[in-house]
Amino acid sequence: MSKITFMSGEKVPLEMHKVRMVQKLNLLPVEDRARKMEEAGYNTFLLKNRDVFLDMLTDSGVNAMSDNQYAAMMQADDSYAGSETFYKLEKVLQDTFGMKYFLPAHQGRACEHIIARTLVTPGSVALMNYHFTTTKALITLSGGSVEEIIDDEGLKIESSASFKGDIDIEKLNEAIKRIGKDKISFVRIEAGTNLVGGQPVSMQNIRDVSRICRKEGIVFVFDASLLADNLYFIKTREEEFKNSEIIDIAREIGSLSDIFYFSGRKLGTARGGGILTSDEKLHARMRELIPLFEGFITYGGMSVREMEAMAVGIRETMDYNVISQTPVFIEALSNELISKGVPVVTPPGGLGCHVDASRFCEHIPRNQYIAGSLNAAIFIASGVRGMERGTLSEQRNEDGSEQMADMELVRLAIPKRVFTLSQIKYTADRISWLFKNRRLIGGLEFIEEPSVLRFFFGRLKPIGDWPELLVRQFRKDFGDSL
Ligand SMILES: Cc1ncc(COP(=O)(O)O)c(C=O)c1O
């Protein structure tokens, strides 16, 4: 959003784009929403999109693309090897992040797979600000483990810290001393920490971590999947960068990283992924795995059309007016909810608005999947599909006990340039209603529990008849409104 002041003084997140292609939405009556939720095993991943009104599950692969991205897709050079499209994307990535080599992959977790296979040895430890679901699963699969060394502020729901995603430098130094650098597979910073409220990392922290890693000879990996919002926060919250160009911030991050990878479903607003490095040896080791797991090294499992869209999308990510839209909408939704007393993660971060299910549903026992329950209740109350980011998204411990999440959150993702302000207001209205009626919400229990990444296709059932009570109250309060 550009600097536009309204006469009223009100902070309105004004869209700096216009909508020229639309998709019709469907809002089912509340009784049908409850039935669809039951059919989906109270897991919003298992809902059919046709039954969803506002899809706030994720931004992954569903951000609005620009006219220039669609135009570029028409020029794709379809060839197995040596496609012109590959060289175009490679050049954009090299120019933007200042790194030498680009390895394409079909999405973010594919990059993580390649990196884990290259760097993780049995018994090794990967240090990071915070894990992402697929990152941790793939490191564990290679016999390694994850240790989180995020700043204490990062795990507080409410805070005034600007960069809650920062690594605690003291914890990093202590962990290197305790574990020994030879047993550390890599140190990873995740921009825009997905599982703990989309909280950004400061450039100062990236500099400090990079310096320590280089001094110790430890590989520094930067997960740039959520970099777009993080770039916005570095510019707006870190004094030194307030007059900087976005591309200069991006380039500095590239220069500080040994390996830089991203989900192109998020960064670049297309569908794909990639790994960048300037290290010849690391490049050679990772390159060998690309044809084996992804595809030939000039497409890596991606469609050339998506690669064209990604090249334009990466360039557009360097435009402040493009990247500011999501964070200002998240701030608007968070502030609207806060004004109604709804507990959310503060300060508002990137990716989405994160509702604190622990406080919202403090009457639900921890072992009954608080965030999963609230997520299902939100869908019944509104047709808005969020994502559980709590204990359900964790894997059980080896002894079968629950790995309780640090936070029980429902994430309402705001895909880039997809929703309007009235849709944001509708979401806030229904969640505020639910907050007033929160005592009606009950817990969930598994009826089918996969052993890996169970949140994707596990099925649950309600404990008690709370979904029916919720529907009855909705009808009482909203009459025949959808
Ligand atoms: C921080 C982060 N890293 C990695 C990934 C994995 O990317 P993908 O979904 O493209 O496999 C994601 C996806 O949400 C992410 O948010």
Image (cartoon, rainbow, N blue to C red):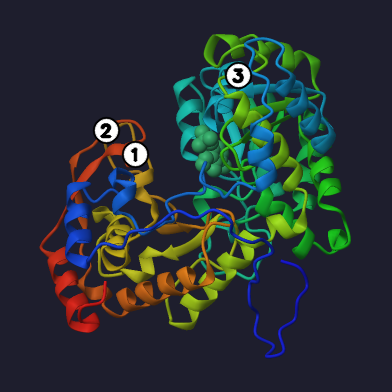
Question: Residue visible at 10% across and 63% down?
Answer: 465
Q: What is the x, y in percent for residue 236?
A: 76, 64
- Circle 1 crowding by C-alpha within 10 Å: few under 14, some 14–19, many from 20: some
Q: Secondary structure at mark 2?
A: loop
Q: In the rendering, which numbered label is found on residue 5?
A: none
Labels 1 and 3: the sequence-earlier one: 3
- In this rendering, position of residue 390 left or right of residue 91: left
Q: In the picture, residue 372 is in which quadrant?
A: bottom left
Residue matched to label 1 = 456
Question: Residue visible at 71% across and 84% down?
Answer: 6
Asked if the residues shown at circle 2 and circle 1 are in contact, with their CB atoms under 8 angstroms apart, the answer is: yes
Which one is nearer the viewer's eye here, 189 or 37? 37
* Residue 18 position (above or below residue 431): above
Foreground label between 2 and 1: 1
Residue type (three-letter) at the residue carrying disc 2: Pro
Residue 147 appears in the rendering:
no
Labels 2 and 1: the sequence-earlier one: 2
- The N terminus - image quarter: bottom right
Q: In the rendering, which numbered label is found on residue 300?
A: 3
Residue matched to label 2 = 450
* Residue 250 position (above or below residue 337): above
